[in-house]
Amino acid sequence: MDGFLLDRGFQVLLTAYPEAQQVLDYGALDLQPFEPGALVRCGGKFQRLVDPWRRPQHLLATAFSSVGTLGDKLRIAGLRRRVGRLTLEELYEQPEQTTAERLRDEGFSTRIIERFFRPFLGGVFLDRDLETSSRLFAFVFRMFASGDAVLPSQGMGAIAQQLAERLPPGTVCTNSAVARLEERGVRLTDGRQLSGRAIVVATESPTAARLVGEAQPPAGRSVTCLYFAAERPPVDEPILVLNGEGLGVVNNLCVPSRVAPAYAPPGAALVSATVLGSPAIADHPLESSVRQELQEWFGNQVKTWRHLRTYHIPFALPVQTPPALSPVAKSPRRQDGPWLCGDYLDTASIQGAMVSGRRAADDVLRRL
């Protein structure tokens, strides 16, 4: 749009995802990393909290940051060490509780939970209350600690494009909505019928529930993303900015063009602001609220930003509160019905979506 590359909402790929490592060609995606950490807005200024193992030059800034106590930083190190020793299977076998309960049990102070974990994990889970399963927390913590958060140089859509390019020409039909499933195929909304030996429903869970006739679709979490064009970036590094003050509507912000330059045309910057949920106000007053809030963060330069687009994503992630991940891996088939795959059948992540797809494919091959 106007030379800017807009992902459908703020997204990242974690390079440590095991399934992504197997399936994707990272080199061809030309992955561009974020700084391993965040700038946390609290007390009217920005505090740096980064991974000292990968950024030792910021060790002192992180240690003395007011985001948390020194004991909190040591507890993060201890948690990193413990989850790094375990396999994913062992992580998934740990007792399931909410993430908030797990953080308290780990001994973290209220300060670091409120200032860092709520906005950071809130942006990952779209759940600032941290009611999400502790098994998903342990998995995500392990992935962030053992790899990079990245953007493909040509946007997140390059991941799907790479997968599609490996298929025979003409395999993928876009803009072809499915009206209903039939005994040996699907009926499209334009009346066409497609047949096959197996049907795999690879959609978000509400659509899957409708197609297979489940009365109660699983709950989901929504998110709203606002994109702005700026003459210069509000932060000069590829780092996530978190709202650690607990006030206002913005949960997190980043400048994707500082991570991957192709997200903006030359001489411009792309700013992404994330608002959790679906605000009950119209787009224009929401944009005004976001702009006013960010003006307090970055000054009058925000007045010159041009609003590009607002994305409302009503079902961005499945709700995964306990006992949703007991077990983590769900069956890809409902009795004798079609096969299902999606992140709601595993961890709410790109890893969960991909490994669920592999599970469904393996079962199709075995049964056929």
Image (cartoon, grey):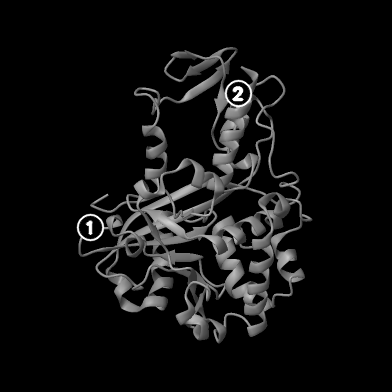
| Residue with the most extreme front position | 85
Rendered view: 269 above or below 13: below
Q: Which part of the image, by quadrant, shows the C terminus?
A: top right
Circle 1 is placed at which residue position?
A: 265
The circle drawn on residue 302 is: none
Q: At which x and y percent is residue 44?
A: 48, 83
Q: Secondary structure at mark 2?
A: helix
Which residue is at a point 33% across and 65% down the rendered structure image? Answer: 258
Which residue is at a point 51% across and 70% down the rendered structure image? Answer: 248
Q: Looking at numbered disc 2 in the image, what kind of residue is underneath it? A: Val
Q: Looking at numbered disc 1 in the image, what kind of residue is underneath it? A: Pro
Mark 2–mark 1 Cα distance, whole angstroms, equals: 45 Å
The reply to whether discs 2 and 1 touch (Cβ–Cβ < 8 Å) is: no
Rendered view: 292 above or below 224: below
Q: Of the residues under marks 2 and 1, which one precedes in the sequence? A: 1
> Which of the 4 image quadrants contains residue 97?
bottom right
Which residue is at a point 54% across and 44% down the rendered structure image? Answer: 19
**325 sits left or right of 178 in the view:** right
Rendered view: 6 above or below 110: above
The circle drawn on residue 364 is: 2
Q: Secondary structure at mark 1?
A: loop
Q: At which x and y percent is residue 183?
A: 60, 12
Q: Nearer the viewer, residue 26 or 118?
A: 26
Q: Nearer the viewer, mark 2 or mark 1?
A: 2
Q: At which x and y percent is residue 255?
A: 36, 64
Q: Residues within 10 Å of mark 1 (few under 14, many from 20)?
A: some
Q: How many marks?
A: 2
> Which of the 4 image quadrants contains residue 33?
bottom left
Which residue is at a point 37% across and 38% down the rendered structure image? Answer: 161
